Image (spheres, rainbow, N blue to C red):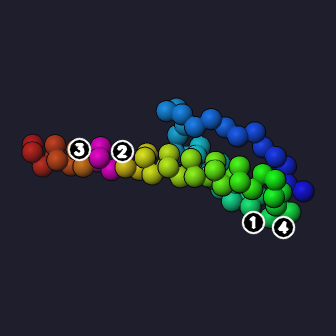
Amino acid sequence: MATKKTAKTTDENTGYAEALSELESILDELESDDVDVDVLAEHVKRASELIELCRDRIGKAKLRIEEVVAQIDAD
């Protein structure tokens, strides 16, 4: 049976790589043959939080890249 993991807190210090790794762990557990239905909703909620964090990190990185490119073009 799948083991129940303690949900981690998502905060400003949670990095993209850490969030992605946790998402992969959740996916592996959900794809297993012995998914614990009692924690399914908890996993889906956590995955949603992590996806939002990853999208935010990607958006911020895109903006920084655009700023750097704009600065290079201006020079």
Residue on which the image places disc 3: 68
Q: Earlier in the sequence, mark 3 or mark 1?
A: 1
Q: Nearer the viewer, mark 2 or mark 3?
A: 2
Q: Amino acid at mark 4?
A: Asp
What SS does tag 2 mark?
helix
**Residue drawn at 78 percent across, 43 percent down:** 5
Q: Amino acid at mark 1?
A: Glu
Q: Tell me if mark 3 has few (under 14), some (14-19) or many (20+) residues whose alpha carbon lies within 10 angstroms of its own.
A: few
Q: Nearer the viewer, mark 3 or mark 1?
A: 1
Q: Earlier in the sequence, mark 4 or mark 3?
A: 4
Label 2, label 1: how far apart the Cα atoms are: 31 Å
Residue on which the image places disc 1: 31
Residue on which the image places disc 4: 33
What SS does tag 1 mark?
helix
Label 2, label 3: how far apart the Cα atoms are: 12 Å
Residue on which the image places disc 2: 60
Query: Chief secondary structure of the magenta span?
Result: helix
The C terminus lies in quadrant: top left
Span highlighted in magenta in the image: 61-65
